[in-house]
Amino acid sequence: MMMRGILRWRSGNTLPKYKEGFFVFRDFHAPGRSAVYAPHAMAATSHPLATNAALEILREGGTAADAAVAAMAVYAVAEPHMTGIGGDCFAIVAQPDGTLSGMNSSGRAPKNVSADKLIADGLLDIEPHSVHAITVPGALRGWEKMLKDHGKFSFEQVLQRAIGYARDGYAVSPRAAFDWKEAVDFLKRDEGATELFLKDGRAPVAGEVMRNPQLAETLEAVAKGGADAFYHGTIAEEIAAVVQSKGGYLTAEDLVAHEAVDLTPVTTDYRGVTVAELPPNGQGIIALVMLELMKRFDWADLDPMGPERFHLQMEIAKLAYSGRDRFLADPEFMEHDPQAFLDPDYIDGLAKLIRTDAVLPRQPEDVLSPKSDTVYLSVVDENGLAVSFINSIYHGFGSGIAAPKSGVLLQNRGACFTLEADHPNQIAGGKRPMHTIIPAMALKDGLPYMSFGVMGGGYQPCGHVHVLSNHLDYGMNMQEAIDCPRMFIDEKSLSLQAETSVPTETVEALKALGHEVAIVASPIGGGQAIMFDRANGGGLIGGSDPRKDGCALGY
């Protein structure tokens, strides 16, 4: 039975309640943030400087793609622990008529690496912060493709704000300062990272001005010469030299060979909405598997903060993620067509394993924890072009290895590979790893409805489903759907991870059902969303995650 009274936050504050059948989070007597409404255009990011950069480009006549790249470049400067040009990116673009396209600019493993070589070197797995976790940085080719395919502006136009912040400085935001402080010892392992990201051996505090003049020079080179300035010549040579000096296999030729590719999104329908995700090597298909399983249950009868909902959602996640870890990889090496994951017989077989009154007796292995660092943004322009865009260096500060002359911190996405023989995701030269970062888009009646995404490593499919269900099953607006407390699965113990805002009675009921539940110190993930409010005249409604420092703004 649904609890309709006022629930309590673990901190003791009142949790908002149902009102006329809808879940209402915003209480104007308490701290909080409202959804953002605008008639023409909007940007939602996890950093105010990035949101502002996007809006400036939109006001200057740029498209949503131009604005998205400008915002992502600012992210690369102001949130170096989360993302950068040393990482990868993916995007889904919805045209005003609902036509969807996808882009994958994830980097490959060095052509000269192999599982046999790494095993011969004494490795049992690919340690996340080792040089062997570094793959080709894919982001800039993806940015370039976005501008070419969907933009009006040049690199020189969209990179100016990021160049200015890198050269002249930006004030460190509170959440960035929190994460930075946790990474000090990690950054000290590499001279280049220490030089670029620490001040006298310490992390910057909130409000302190940081600069990266080396990155400013690199971005200026890209502004003048395009992505070729990064993938050819001295910048690529420095990156390769840094990796090789630490025993890695990356070469300048690996960077030259990188290209961004077009993808056709994969879709399924849920509660009258068509949800689009990108096919592998990303994990977006797992969100669609979860939605297919969600259809088997009546969520409207379950309290959105209650144990019944969280139990079912986590059991569904366990089953969906077990398929991910066994089968997902670079599609050139996968044994199964991604559409097979949505086959009704496969979904029905999984659904039969779920019990409402008990925990799955055999739990899936190798579920990722939501500890990775990524940035996501959403932009809609005045013509109705919607861009769902995500960029990441994987773990916080990526590999922790930097190319100091170019100011570039290198990702550790290769940690997603395995050394397991005959596994489709076994590391091999020129192969893309299974990827956690995923953008999403939703259509309604064939037209763009929601551009959204949720950061957080392995949590992202679960996060997409949670936000969608909050909106479609419980009537929450974009901000409420993002605010709603979260839960996920721990990588090692397979216990449930609950945010502190999950009600105590829900946690205790889950324990009584047989779950192990741990309260996490850091919030889970971070999302952004923009919805087309066609029912009220076609304006936009945006939300931005309070777990981060950003905001949604429009005009």
Image: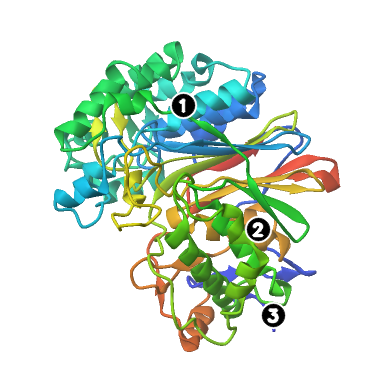
**Residues at circles 1 and 3 in contact by the CB criterion of under 8 Å:** no
Residue neighbourhood size for the residue with mark 3, other residues' Cα within 10 Å, grouped as few (<14), some (14–19), many (≥20): few
Q: Quadrant of the C terminus?
A: top right
Q: Is residue 317 left or right of residue 533?
A: left
The Cα atoms of the two marked residues, 3 and 2, are separated by 19 Å
Front residue of 415 and 118: 118
* Secondary structure category for the residue under label 3: loop
What label sits on residue 141 in the rendered view? 1
**Mark 2 closeness class: few <14, some 14–19, many ≥20 residues within 10 Å:** many
Residue pointed to by mark 3: 2
Q: Is residue 9 left or right of residue 258?
A: right
Residue 154 visible here: yes
Picture layout, residue 312 above or below residue 130: below
Residue 507 placement (x, y as % from top left): 49, 79
Amino acid type, callout 2: Leu
| Residue tagged 2 | 468
Tell me the residue at 77%/36% (across/down): 39
Q: Residues within 10 Å of mark 1 (few under 14, many from 20)?
A: many
Percent of width and height locating residue 537 = 85, 41
Kind of residue sitting beneath label 3: Met
Rounded to the nearest angstrom, the CA distance separating label 1 from label 3 is 49 Å
